[in-house]
Amino acid sequence: MYDAAVARLLAPWLRRAIEAAVVASVVAITTLLGDQLTGPGRPALMTGPAGALRLAPGVLALGVVTVAYPVAMAATRSDALLGAISGFLLASDLTILFTGALFVVALASLPALVGLLASQVATPLGFGRRAGAGAAVTGALIALVILAVVATR
């Protein structure tokens, strides 16, 4: 819970960026660190469908949640843009800091960028529920295509 005084100090876009980043980085970090608990004999990154399934929660959380939530909850276009960009960068930094999984962040960057662009182009306002939904759906579709390509390798 936020303290009321602290909430007044932070801009609304920054609060939303932090909220999205915390949720996305917790999902990405726990799924990536959970894979390491399977034992030392298992490779860190498997190939094929199993490898894509291991990366999917982190890629979807970083590429979709960090963009869709700030855009959907924003009150202005600038709040949407600043919140989405800040949320993605903060979640990416936390994920790399705790897991060293730069590959997951690289895979999530294209869905985040395309989702943000879709939210700004597909709706006249560029913020709100419709823009957030557009960012989520577009980002998720791009992420699934990327994961399908990873699964074929």
Image (cartoon, helix red, strand yellow):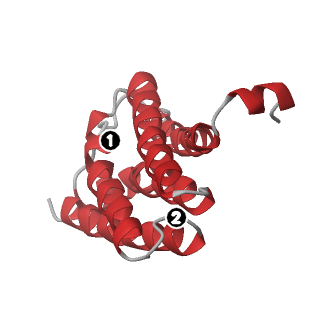
Instruction: Check whether the beta carbons of the residues at disc 1 and disc 2 lie within 8 A of each other.
Output: no
Decide which of tag 1 and tag 2 comes sooner along the chain: 1
Q: Tell me if 80 is positioned left or right of 99 in this view.
A: right
Query: 63 or 72: nearer the eye?
Result: 72
Decide if residue 118 is on the left or right side of residue 10: left
Q: Say which residue label 2 marks.
A: 127
Q: Position of residue 44 (x, y in %)?
A: 31, 36
Residue in front for this viewpoint, 72 or 30: 72
- Kind of residue indicated by mark 2: Phe
Residue 130, above or below 147: below
SS at badge 2: loop
Which one is closest to the eye, mark 1 or mark 2? 2
Q: Amino acid at mark 1?
A: Val
Q: Which mark is residue 105?
A: 1
Picture quarter with the N terminus: top right
Residue shown at 32%/43% (left/top)? 104
Farthest left residue in view:
153
> Residue at 76% across / 32% down in the picture?
8
> Residue at left 30%, top 67%?
142
On the image, the x and y values in percent for residue 57 come to 46, 54
Q: Is residue 39 above or below residue 52?
A: above
* Residue farthest along the top direction in this orientation: 97
| Label 1 crowd bin: few (<14), some (14–19), many (20+), radius 10 Å | many
Q: CA distance from mark 1 to mark 2?
A: 24 Å
